Amino acid sequence: MTPRPLATLAALAAAFFASPFGTATAQTVSAGVSGYWALGSGPIPESEWVHIDVTRNDRVLHAEASGSGGQPIIIPCVPCCGGAVTGPGETRAAVTGFAAADPGVLHVYAGDRAIARGPIAPPNLPPIPNPATVYTNIQAGASFSDLLTVHATGLAAGTEVQVPFNYMAEVVADSLFNYPEYSPHALTVYASFTIPGYAPQNFSTDSSLQFFQRTLLSNGLWLYRLQSSGYSFTAHVGDELAIGATFGISGQANITDFNRQLEFGAVADGRNTAGLWLGTLPAGMTITSASGHDYTIDPTAAPVIGAVPEPESYALMLAGLACLGHVARRRKSRASKG
């Protein structure tokens, strides 16, 4: 079976990670990771795709999932051409994903890499092809929903008030998203925010509109960031208001006879972070939540999840690449631009 096109995969991922934010029932958090890999020749049947094992670390109002998988095959050096020796070749598939959700804040991380590199030919000889087929696929997504209640000292129930809010999502990646346009891309990042009085705020790096502001960092990685500015919504004292957000990364990196290349893939680190929070409230106004979370706390000012290790299989696969998600270095790079 031929792997699904990336556009179809992104649509499936968006549907998979969608949350019922509009239902004013209770607070929820969810996180999921799924993926597969396959090595072979020619079209690889779906029955031979190897699905990754996923580990969960859930607790009250915290959802977390992580998983990785893959396999390297090293093509050994062989004598050739009157005493010369070829360099090693490699066939490799590797995928990894992480997602975590808490009220008001979401973290995701994903990577896929396919390699089909033939042995290195001696000087002055043509390249040695590697005809292997490699499939990789990863989806990682997190979401939360919650109910806010508006309180205001000295104002009667039903009095109209304005509530300021903010949302933000950012990732650091080792490659450009959606470039060149209309070409296959190894990963897509998407985010959605549900805010009272507004249509769903949906964003994707696959969009022709540049929702995510792109910045080249001094370490050669790319920062993608979107953030609201100066928004507020109309509410009434005593209102119960449903809010929520979704943040995810999905993609596939394949090498086939129709897409023959040495290496294809990407890494995207969104562990710092995506969030939804309130702005400075007017004097006398307080807003409580069903989850108990204080939405006046800016999640972008909180420390990044420092305890999340790089998945071992992916760390091996990416040996030699710069480590993504090193927040201190990233913020230093960002500060140097300012």
Image (cartoon, rainbow, N blue to C red):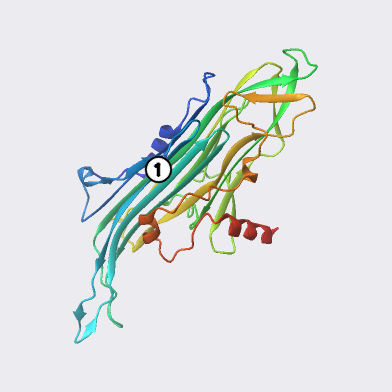
Element assignment for label 1: strand
Location of residue 244 by image quarter: top right
Q: Give the position of the C terminus as an image quadrant.
A: bottom right
Closer to the camera, 197 or 277? Answer: 277
Identify which residue is drawn at 52% across, 18% down.
25
> Does the image show residue 253?
no
Image coordinates for residue 320, horizontal then vertical, percent: 43, 66
Left or right: where 185 falls relative to 199: left
Q: Give the position of the N terminus as an image quadrant.
A: top left
Q: How many marks?
A: 1
| Residue 12 higher or lower than 254, as above or below | above
Image coordinates for residue 295, horizontal then vertical, percent: 64, 32
Please give the residue where the numbered disc 1 appears in the rendered image: 139
Q: Residue furthest bottom?
A: 82
Amino acid found under the numbered disc labelled 1: Gln
| Residue 140 higher or lower than 90, as above or below | above
Image coordinates for residue 249, horizontal then vertical, percent: 45, 44
Image coordinates for residue 229, horizontal then vertical, percent: 69, 39
